[in-house]
Image (cartoon, rainbow, N blue to C red):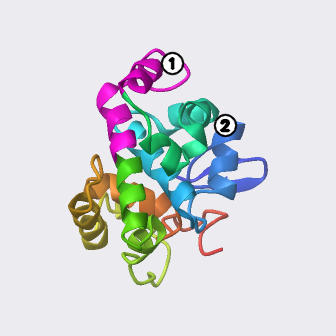
């Protein structure tokens, strides 16, 4: 659905300045670097089953709770950190998602120890560009062969909570694909 606000036509984000800023300045822009990709991966995992706006509103609390998403720091979290996070009302308090974030930080650290990077793994699954913007949200897939391949590789590397749908959302958020629909101010920037 195309929504209009502030003299801009957006495919989502209408009515909330935080959501509008995310749409205009972040979603679909290329993101590189292990810490930035790790942050998006963790947030996409926490978003599962929730509104993205809920996650955006809690993002600064997530950053504080998860050591600014520095994989090395989060990899050192232990059971007492899990309990600390479960008591933090500023984040989504889901034990499985918290434990997944810690497991995934450890996987990033192990990946680096093996001479690779999360950036390299994620971006190696970028699909070829489309010929044009999707016409409607119904034309945007929930997952793709590339997101399924990314999920499979990440799982083989020790990552968890990284299914094909969540990884497609990561691909959208980090600019591997551009799913702004036709008519959106951000389509084919």
From the top left corner, tell me how far across and down residue 75 is, in percent: 43, 44
State the separation of the CA atoms marked 1 and 2. 28 Å
Mark 2, secondary structure of its residue: loop
From the top left corner, tell me how far across and down residue 161 is, in percent: 28, 46
- Reading the image, the residue beneath label 1 is 88
Q: Is residue 136 something one can see in this rendering? A: no
Q: What secondary structure prevails in the magenta region?
A: helix
- Label of residue 15 in the image: 2
Residue 89 magenta-highlighted:
yes
Q: Is residue 10 above or below residue 65?
A: below
Q: Is residue 43 above or below residue 171?
A: above
Q: Is residue 162 above or below residue 62?
A: below
From the top left corner, tell me how far across and down residue 50 is, in percent: 40, 33
Q: Is residue 167 above or below residue 89?
A: below
Mark 1, secondary structure of its residue: loop
Q: Which residues are magenta?
A: 79-103
Q: Is residue 110 something one can see in this rendering? A: yes
């Amino acid at each position: 659905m195309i929504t209009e606000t502030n003299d801009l036509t957006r495919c989502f984000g209408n009515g909330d300045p935080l959501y509008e800023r995310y749409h205009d300045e972040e979603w679909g822009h290329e993101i590189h670097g292990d810490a930035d990709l790790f942050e998006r991966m963790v947030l996409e995992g926490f978003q599962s089953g929730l509104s993205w706006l809920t996650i955006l509103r809690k993002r600064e609390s997530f950053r504080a709770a998860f050591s600014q998403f520095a994989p090395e720091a989060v990899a050192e979290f232990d059971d007492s950190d899990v309990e600390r996070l479960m008591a933090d009302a500023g984040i989504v308090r889901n034990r499985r998602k918290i434990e997944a974030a810690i497991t995934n930080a450890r996987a990033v650290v192990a990946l680096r120890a093996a001479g690779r990077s999360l950036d390299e793994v994620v971006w190696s699954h970028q699909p070829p560009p489309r010929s044009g913007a999707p016409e409607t949200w119904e034309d945007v897939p929930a997952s793709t062969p590339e997101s399924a391949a990314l999920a499979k590789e990440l799982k083989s590397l020790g990552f968890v909570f990284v299914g094909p749908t969540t990884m497609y959302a990561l691909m959208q958020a980090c600019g591997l694909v551009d799913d702004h629909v036709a008519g959106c101010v951000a389509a084919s920037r």
